[in-house]
Amino acid sequence: MTLEEAMALQPEWVAIWVYILVAGAFVAPLVLLIWKASRKAGIITFIASMAAAFGIQMMFGAMGYVKLLGLPHLILWLPIVVFLVAQQARGDMPNWPRRIIWFITTIICISLVFDFIDVVRWVLGERAPLV
């Protein structure tokens, strides 16, 4: 079973959330490439999201669909949130990129809450595969 197949077996709200997450962590950072002031934020966020996705794929291959799969998000996105908050506060940041950065930050933070809960539950012993 692939990661995509395992995710497809989750409740419908999980699939909807994954689409929102893709929009916030992969598509929106690419939109930041339009403005010179936000290009660095877009590139770094997109690269971190790709690295997290790669880490999740590798972990899935080794462990299956378990709660620990949120760990790459925690490791890579916590610093990204700090970076994005600092970037949006820059004086030379236009309003639209600032709004997009807040959208990205909000989506990533919501995901981090889910990921934190899942990783803590895994550490506390909930290690059974989710599907």
Image: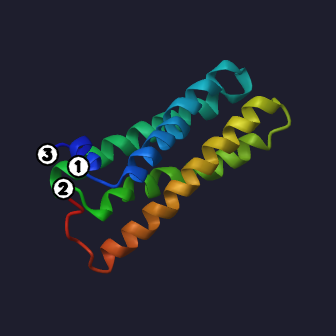
SS at badge 1: helix
Q: In this image, 40 relative to 99: left or right?
A: left
Task: Give the labeled residue for mark 3.
Answer: 1
The answer to the question of whether label 2 and label 1 lie on touching residues, with beta carbons closer than 8 A, is: yes
Residue 24 visible in this rendered orientation of the protein: yes
Number of the front mark, 3 or 2:
3
Task: Give the labeled residue for mark 2.
Answer: 64
Q: CA distance from mark 3 to mark 2?
A: 9 Å
Say what amino acid the circle numbered 1 marks: Ala
The answer to the question of whether label 1 and label 3 lie on touching residues, with beta carbons closer than 8 A, is: yes
Q: Quadrant of the C terminus?
A: bottom left
Q: In this image, 13 relative to 23: left or right?
A: left
Residue for point 16% across, 53% down: 62
Question: Which of pointers 3 and 2 lies earlier in the amino acid sequence?
Answer: 3
Residue for point 46% across, 48% down: 17
Q: CA distance from mark 2 to mark 1?
A: 9 Å
Which class describes the residues within 10 Å of circle 3: few (<14), some (14-19), or many (20+)? few
Numbered tag placed on residue 6 in the rendering: 1
As drawn, the residue found furthest toward the front would be 12
Residue 93 visible in this rendered orientation of the protein: no
Q: Picture quarter containing residue 39?
A: top right
Q: x, y percentage for residue 68?
A: 31, 63
SS at badge 3: loop
Question: Which of pointers 1 and 3 lies earlier in the amino acid sequence?
Answer: 3
Instruction: Indicate how the structure is coloured in the image.
Output: rainbow
SS at badge 2: loop
Which class describes the residues within 10 Å of circle 1: few (<14), some (14-19), or many (20+)? some
Number of the front mark, 2 or 1:
1
Residue for point 13% across, 45% down: 1
The one nearer the camera, 23 or 73, is 23
* Picture layout, residue 25 above or below residue 120: above
As drawn, the residue found furthest toward the right would be 91
